[in-house]
C-alpha cells in the first residue's frame, strides 16, 4: 500500500513539472535540448516546430535579437497557460519581422498563452496593407480563451495608411467563424508601449452580424501607452462588456489623407463597452480626429472619467450611419452615457478640411443616435479656432439624433463659441453652466451663467495630476448644483 502511494506521489510530481525552454540567439544551438541556459536553442524556426503543452515556458535571453516570425503552436489550459517571457537582465529580447510576412508574432487557433517582455517590429521596404506587429487570430475555433499580451514594445510597423485597403496596426485580434461560431474569452492587452505604427494601434475584426451575434467577452485593454500612431488608437469590435481603461494615447502625427477618418478610442458593433480613465491628446486626423467616439451598431457605451485635450477634431463623436440603419446588421447607437470627462482645448484643427471645411466641434452628434446622456462633463475652450462650435447636432444619412440630454455640464469658453442644432428631436438641456460669449444658447430653464471658480483655469499639460487645477473651489455655488469634475478622475487613476 505504501509503495502504491509513493508511486502516485512520484507520478503527480513529474506530471506537474512542465518544460522550460531557453532561447539564446548569441550562444544557443538548435540541436540543443533547450532545457537550460547552457543548452539553449538559437532560432525562431526551432520554436515554430514545437507543439507546446500546458504549463510550458519559452524564455528568450534578454538583449538578444531575432529576425523572422514567431508562430508558436499548441495550447495551454486554464490552470497551466503557456508563457513566453524574457530571462536575464538587459533589454527586452527583440524580434524583427522585416516585413517578410504580415505579422511578426502570430497566435493562430491557440489559447491560454501569455506573451510578455518582448520587443517587436515589422518594417518592410514600403508600406503594405494589413501589415501588423502582432496578430491574434481564431478561426472556426469556438471559444478562444485567455490570450495575454503584457509589457511588449511594438513599434515601426509600416502598414498601409489607407483604411479601405486594410490599413495596418501594432496589434490586431480577429475572430473568424463561418463554420464554427468563434470568439475570444478573456483577452487581455496590458502594459504595452506601442509607437511609430501605421495605420492604427490596437484594433480588431470580429462577428458583427446581429442575426448570429457571438461577441467576444472578457476583453480588457489597460495601462498601454500609444504614440506616433496616425490613425485609430484603440478599437474593440464585436465585443460584449469590453473594458478600455488607464491608457495614454498621444502625439498622433498628421500623416493621413483627407479621405481617412480616425479617432482615439472607439467601439464599433460592441455592447456595454466601458471606456474610463484614459488620456487622449494630439489627434490630428483630417476627418474626425476626436479623442473619443461612441460609434454605430453599439448599445450601452459608457465613456467616463477620461481626459481629452488638444485633439484637432474635438472631444467626442457620437454617431450612427443613417444610410445603413436597421439594415446590414446596424441596430443603431443607443443608450450612450458620457459622464465625468474633462475636455481642454479640443477642436483646434488649424486648417479647413476638404470634406467639411472649418469643422471641429467639441461634441459631434450625428445620425439616428438614440437616448444619449451627456452628464457632469467639464468643457474648456480658451483658444480661438476655425470652428468654435461646442455642440453640433448633425444628420448622417439624412436622419437626426433623437433624445439627447445634456445636464450638469460646465461649458467654459474664452473664445466666441456656438451651439448648432437642426432637426434633431428630444434634445434637452438641464442645469448646465455656460460662461463666455456663446451664440445660439439652448433652452435650459435651470441654466447658470457664473464664472466657474477653478483652482487654476490657465493650467495646461499632460497627466491626470494636472486636473487638480480644474476642480472647483469650495465656495463655488456650482458645487451645490452637482457640477465640476469628480474626485474619481483624480484619485482613482493609477
Image (cartoon, rainbow, N blue to C red):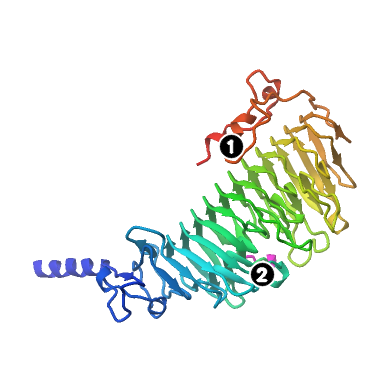
What secondary structure is the stretch in magenta mostly built from?
Answer: helix
Please state, as top left, top right, bottom left or bottom right, where the N terminus lies in the image.
bottom left
Question: Where is residue 452 drawn, in percent x and y?
Answer: 72, 25
Q: Nearer the viewer, residue 467 or 10?
A: 467
| Above or below, 403 relative to 196 | above
Question: Where is residue 41 drawn, in percent x and y?
Answer: 33, 75
The disc at residue 489 is 1
Considering the numbered disc 1 on the image, is that residue within a helix, a strand or a loop? helix
The disc at residue 432 is none
Q: Is residue 217 left or right of residue 230?
A: left
Q: Is residue 242 visible?
A: no
Q: Is residue 351 visible?
A: yes
According to the image, label 2 marks what residue?
160
| Residue at position x 59%, y 46% in the image | 278
Q: Is residue 165 left or right of residue 215?
A: right
Question: Where is residue 359 drawn, in percent x and y?
Answer: 83, 49
Mark 1 is surrounded, within 10 Å at the Cα level, by few (under 14), some (14 to 19) or many (20 or more) other residues, namely many
What is the magenta range? 209-213
Q: Mark 1 to mark 2: distance in Å?
A: 36 Å
Which one is in front in this view, the residue at disc 1 or the one at disc 2? 2
Q: Is residue 132 left or right of residue 117?
A: right
Amino acid at each position: 500500500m505504501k509503495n502504491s502511494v509513493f508511486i502516485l506521489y512520484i507520478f503527480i510530481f513529474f506530471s506537474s513539472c512542465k518544460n522550460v525552454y531557453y532561447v539564446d540567439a548569441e550562444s544557443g544551438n538548435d540541436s540543443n535540448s533547450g532545457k537550460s541556459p547552457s543548452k539553449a536553442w538559437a532560432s525562431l524556426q526551432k520554436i515554430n516546430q514545437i507543439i507546446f503543452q500546458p504549463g510550458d515556458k519559452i524564455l528568450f535571453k534578454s538583449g538578444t535579437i531575432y529576425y523572422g516570425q514567431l508562430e508558436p503552436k499548441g495550447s495551454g489550459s486554464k490552470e497551466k497557460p503557456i508563457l513566453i517571457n524574457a530571462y536575464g537582465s538587459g533589454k527586452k529580447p527583440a524580434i524583427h519581422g522585416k516585413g517578410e510576412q504580415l505579422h511578426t508574432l502570430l497566435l493562430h487557433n491557440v489559447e491560454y498563452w501569455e506573451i510578455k517582455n518582448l520587443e517587436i517590429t515589422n518594417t518592410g521596404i514600403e508600406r503594405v496593407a494589413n501589415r501588423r506587429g502582432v496578430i491574434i487570430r481564431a478561426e472556426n475555433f469556438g471559444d478562444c480563451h485567455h490570450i495575454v499580451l503584457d509589457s511588449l514594445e511594438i513599434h515601426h510597423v509600416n502598414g498601409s495608411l489607407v483604411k479601405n485597403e486594410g490599413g495596418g496596426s501594432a496589434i490586431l485580434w480577429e475572430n473568424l467563424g463561418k463554420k464554427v461560431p468563434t470568439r475570444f474569452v478573456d483577452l487581455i492587452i496590458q502594459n504595452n508601449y506601442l509607437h511609430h505604427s501605421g495605420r492604427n494601434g490596437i484594433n480588431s475584426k470580429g462577428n458583427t452580424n446581429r442575426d448570429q451575434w457571438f461577441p467576444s467577452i472578457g476583453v480588457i485593454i489597460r495601462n498601454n501607452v500609444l504614440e506616433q500612431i496616425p490613425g485609430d488608437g484603440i478599437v474593440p469590435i464585436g465585443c460584449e462588456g469590453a473594458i478600455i481603461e488607464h491608457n495614454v494615447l498621444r502625439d498622433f502625427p498628421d500623416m493621413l489623407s483627407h479621405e481617412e477618418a480616425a479617432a482615439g478610442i472607439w467601439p464599433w458593433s460592441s455592447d456595454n463597452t466601458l471606456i474610463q480613465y484614459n488620456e487622449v491628446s494630439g489627434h490630428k486626423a483630417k476627418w474626425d480626429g476626436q479623442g473619443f467616439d461612441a460609434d454605430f451598431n453599439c448599445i450601452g457605451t459608457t465613456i467616463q472619467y477620461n481626459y481629452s485635450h488638444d485633439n484637432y477634431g474635438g472631444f467626442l463623436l457620437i454617431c450612427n450611419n443613417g444610410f445603413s440603419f436597421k439594415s446590414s446588421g446596424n441596430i443603431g447607437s443607443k443608450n450612450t452615457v458620457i459622464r465625468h470627462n474633462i475636455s481642454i482645448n479640443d477642436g483646434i484643427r488649424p486648417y479647413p478640411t476638404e470634406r467639411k471645411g472649418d469643422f471641429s466641434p467639441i461634441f459631434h452628434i450625428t445620425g439616428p443616435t438614440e437616448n444619449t446622456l451627456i452628464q457632469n462633463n467639464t468643457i474648456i475652450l480658451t483658444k480661438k479656432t476655425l470652428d468654435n462650435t461646442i455642440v453640433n447636432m448633425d444628420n448622417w444619412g439624412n436622419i437626426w439624433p433623437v433624445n439627447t440630454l445634456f445636464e450638469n455640464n460646465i461649458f467654459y469658453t474664452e473664445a466666441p463659441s456656438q451651439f448648432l442644432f437642426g432637426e434633431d428631436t428630444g434634445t434637452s438641456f438641464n442645469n448646465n453652466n455656460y460662461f463666455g460669449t456663446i451664440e445660439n444658447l439652448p433652452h435650459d430653464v435651470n441654466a447658470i451663467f457664473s464664472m466657474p471658480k477653478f483652482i487654476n483655469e490657465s493650467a495646461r499639460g499632460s497627466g491626470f495630476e494636472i486636473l487638480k487645477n480644474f476642480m472647483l473651489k469650495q465656495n463655488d455655488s456650482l458645487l451645490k448644483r452637482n457640477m465640476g469634475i469628480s474626485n474619481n478622475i483624480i484619485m482613482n487613476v493609477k
